[in-house]
Amino acid sequence: MSLTLRDAQHLCWKTFRMINDKIAPDKGKEWTPLVTVADLIEDSGKIASLIKASEETESSDKEGEKEELATVLSNVLYTVFVLAENHGVNIEEAFLQVMNDRVISMIS
């Protein structure tokens, strides 16, 4: 399945709303933007730990480490999309602008 960044952002938002509006209240929990940012920070720390561990050791489970890193990176991407949608940011347009700015700064 192929998605644009905008499609992915919308899919993440729909999933987030479904979980937050239907499932989370049954458990007495709700994800606020601040809690979502805390999850982002936690996952960023996991990424740092995984990268550090992979650079410091010669592990025999490279595929397992790669899968774990892929999962955590995907969690970060999901969280970024949810935060962007929550705050009215079109992440696809913003990303393309940042990439354009970087290219311009490199050739200037």
Image: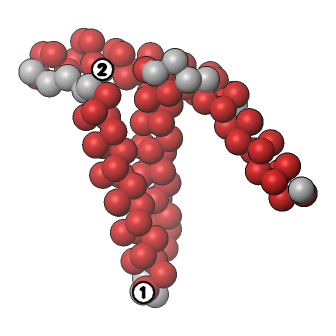
Q: Position of residue 26 (x, y in %)?
A: 12, 16
x and y percent of residue 64 in the render? 43, 66
Q: Is residue 48 above or below residue 74?
A: below
State which quadrant residue 21 falls in: top left
Between 88 and 8, the residue placed more toward the observer is 88
Q: Secondary structure at mark 1?
A: loop
Q: Quadrant of the N terminus?
A: top right
**What residue is rendered at 47% in x and 36% in y?**
80
Which corner quadrant of the image does residue 99 belong to? top right
Residue 19 percent coordinates (x, y): 30, 20
Disc nearer the start of the sequence (1/2): 2
Q: Name the side, left or right, on which 18 lies relative to 23.
A: right
Q: At 26% across and 25% down in the image, what residue appears?
A: 32
| Along the line of sight, the residue nearer the viewer: 20 or 102 | 102
What residue is shown with label 1?
57
Q: Is residue 3 positioned above or below 10 on the image?
A: below
Residue wearing tag 2: 19
From the viewer's perspective, is residue 50 above or below residue 82? below
Instruction: Name the amino acid type tagged 2.
Output: Ile
Q: In this rendering, would 104 be left or right of 10? A: right
What amino acid is found at the position of numbered circle 1 in the picture?
A: Thr
Residue drawn at point x = 50 percent, y = 41 percent:
77
Q: Is residue 96 above or below residue 32?
A: below
Which residue is outermost to the top? 22
Measuring from the top left, give residue 8's x and y in whole percent. 58, 27
Q: Residue at x 25, y 26 (%)?
A: 31
Q: Is residue 90 left or right of residue 2?
A: left
Relative to the observer, which residue lies in front, 29 or 57? 29
Which of the labelled discs sits on residue 85, or is there none?
none
